[in-house]
Amino acid sequence: MSAERDLDRPARDRSELVDLLEEHLLGEAPSLTGAQVADEVGLDLDVARERWRSLGFPAVGDDVVAFTRADLEALRRTEELIGLGVVDGEDQHALVRSLGRSFARLAEWQMGLLARAVDPERMTLAEMAALVEQVTPSVDALQSYVWRRHTLLAASRMVLAQEAAHETAQESGQESGQGSGREGDAGAPGDDVEGTVTGVGFADIVGYTKQSRSLSRRELARLVDHFEGRALEIVTEHEGRIIKTIGDEIMLVADTPGALARIGLALVAEGERDDFPDLRVGLAWGPALARLGDVLGPVVNLAARLTSTARPGTVLIDRALAEQLDDDPEVSLRRIGRTSVRGYRRLEPWRLKWR
């Protein structure tokens, strides 16, 4: 931190506060240009510039001193991952964009919290520096821990799914008299089927648009926070995962039909409580492509259309999921009239209830 700065006075010039944060978070004041960073890493300047923009950072002139050794080290680590084959050329841009979007949202929220504890009009630069130095290591360590835990969970799901696919392939080969590795085995290398069979669902707050007009910002924030928090508890309790939240809606996935059904029913049951908003849920079953934390494919669109069709407090599912749940003793299914929605002229929904 600069020894010339008087830290025992309030930050009347807000640029001083920005400089203080920059030196604390990045370890030093900027001393490098973009051209110098690219040259030291051995990377073409256009490639380095593209990665910087993909992270969501504002454009900087090539000769402007705006970078630190931390920026250089981040670029070098990206190159190491590519060199190790962990990230190939096709995926590197998508990975960088995903990192940028995820951490941009997280940082905006975290700084909103920190702003409540920082008063530049009253606190001195030294007091603000002390607060940031206390908060940053804790947040940094917590983020690292959460990432490691979720990495373990993702790796476990992947390994177990591969094991299940291998066992299914072996059983299929034995039943048809084929040996392992022969053409036609399920899950064999070269399969052109993307993704895995996955359950996808959406849960939507009923009447959110109307409520958003009548509630204050604080009340609306409490409503959404309560919805997201309780939904997360329900989804994880039944071994599902929330992929993302989209304002008044969550997107979720589950690995088994039973888990997906129980998540949907538990969510709408929660909507019957006085302190929880009414929900409508749509669920679908089929091949989906998992990519950079998101899930893509026709099954996602189908689940979304079912959600928009569902009445408040109900769960609608597609035919594929209904077939999977046909022998489940805990749930009942009722086929309802076919309907036409965007992208599906003859959508065939089923109503899902506890038996």
Image (tube, rainbow, N blue to C red):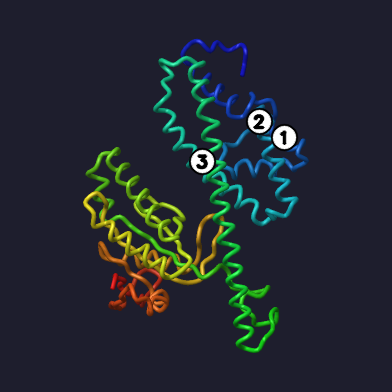
Q: In 3D space, how far apart are the residues under numbered discs 2 and 1 (Cα atoms)? A: 8 Å
Which residue is under mark 1? 37
Residue 337 relative to residue 239: left or right: left
Mark 2 or 3: in front is 3
List x then y, in percent, for residue 147. Answer: 55, 46
Dot 1, how many residues are within 10 Å of its Cα: few (below 14), some (14-19), or many (20+)?
Answer: many
Which residue is under mark 2? 67
Q: Residue at x 65, y 82 (%)?
A: 184
Q: Give the structural element (helix, strand or loop) at label 1.
A: helix
Which residue is under mark 3? 104
Q: Residue at x 75, y 50 (%)?
A: 83
Three-letter code, disc 3 = Ala
Mark 2 touches mark 1? (CB < 8 Å): yes
Q: Residue at x 64, y 29 (%)?
A: 66
Three-letter code, disc 1 = Val
Three-letter code, disc 2 = Phe
Residue 119 relative to residue 81: left or right: left
Q: Residue furthest bottom?
A: 177
Q: Residue furthest front?
A: 329
Of pointers 3 and 1, the one earlier in the residue sequence:
1
